[in-house]
Amino acid sequence: AQSVTQLDSQVPVFEEAPVELRCNYSSSVSVYLFWYVQYPNQGLQLLLKYLSGSTLVKGINGFEAEFNKSQTSFHLRKPSVHISDTAEYFCAVSKFNDYKLSFGAGTTVTVRA
Amino acid sequence: DVKVTQSSRYLVKRTGEKVFLECVQDMDHENMFWYRQDPGLGLRLIYFSYDVKMKEKGDIPEGYSVSREKKERFSLILESASTNQTSMYLCASSTGTGVGGEIDTQYFGPGTRLTVL
């Protein structure tokens, strides 16, 4: 089975500063990787996903993530955050030919002015 | 736009009650999922369904059952609610079968916050 570790539970950041959220996974087979965001009092929505091809994936709202197979990582970045990026972010993984997702514990990002 | 709706945003029940959580999706998706979300644990899969009347256990099925009589509706049932089932419950749906390595995005509902007293 695959597992997902989000290395930071809380990330405070000032507005317009860059942010990086770290995600590592373990799996004995090839995987697909996802980042989801949950704004306060809402469900989850997809930020971006890696299925194959270029290891740098661009998503919505200026976010991007880089797949590093040797490091088994899929870190999420944004060069300049806004107050509206305050949310909880979840990394998730699924294996080939499987539509089930395994989620990390989540990282809460709080953006301050 | 894909829409996944859940019957209640907030629900308060008593220990021992039978609880039904309903989820409806409007995009003709084959797959539907129930998760519970707890602080520090992320989302954990309770049950999923890949077709009408088909279901499979997820990682934490104990104390729960599900029903899928129609493609668009997936119900989670707590046969006898207990305080340790107080949680946020999220429903999701997706299309695709995973065959050939393809996987489609899961779309989530807004969640139901269940409190069991």
Image (tube, coloured by chain):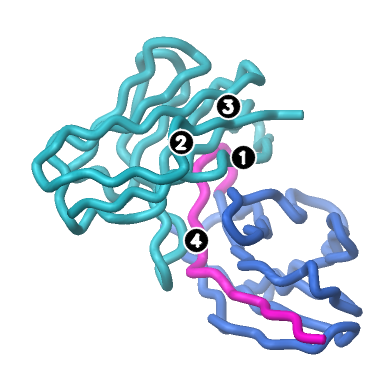
Chain colours: A blue, B cyan
Q: Mark 3 lies on which chain?
A: B
Q: Chain for mark 2?
A: B
> Residue B33 shows which numbered tag?
2
Tell me, yes or no, whether the highlighted magenta stretch contains residue A9. Answer: no
Quadrant hosting residue A48: bottom right
Residue B20, compared with residue B13, is above or below; it is: above
Q: Is residue B48 above or below residue A55?
A: above
The location of residue B90, given as percent across then percent down, is 47, 44
- Residues tagged 4 and 2 counted as in contact (Cβ below 8 A): no
Q: Give the number of the mark in front: 1 or 3.
A: 1
Which badge, 1 or 2, comes first in the chain's sequence? 2
At horizontal 68% and vertical 87% (from top left) the residue drawn is A12
Q: Residue A28 carries which label?
A: 4
Q: Which residue is drawn at 49% across and 45% down?
A: B111
**Label 2 vs label 3: CA separation?**
14 Å
Same chain, labels 3 and 4: no
The residue tagged 3 is: B97
Q: Do the residues labelled 1 and 2 touch (CB within 8 Å)?
A: yes
Secondary structure at badge 3 equals loop
* Residue at the spot 71% in from the left edge and 71% down from the top edge: A86
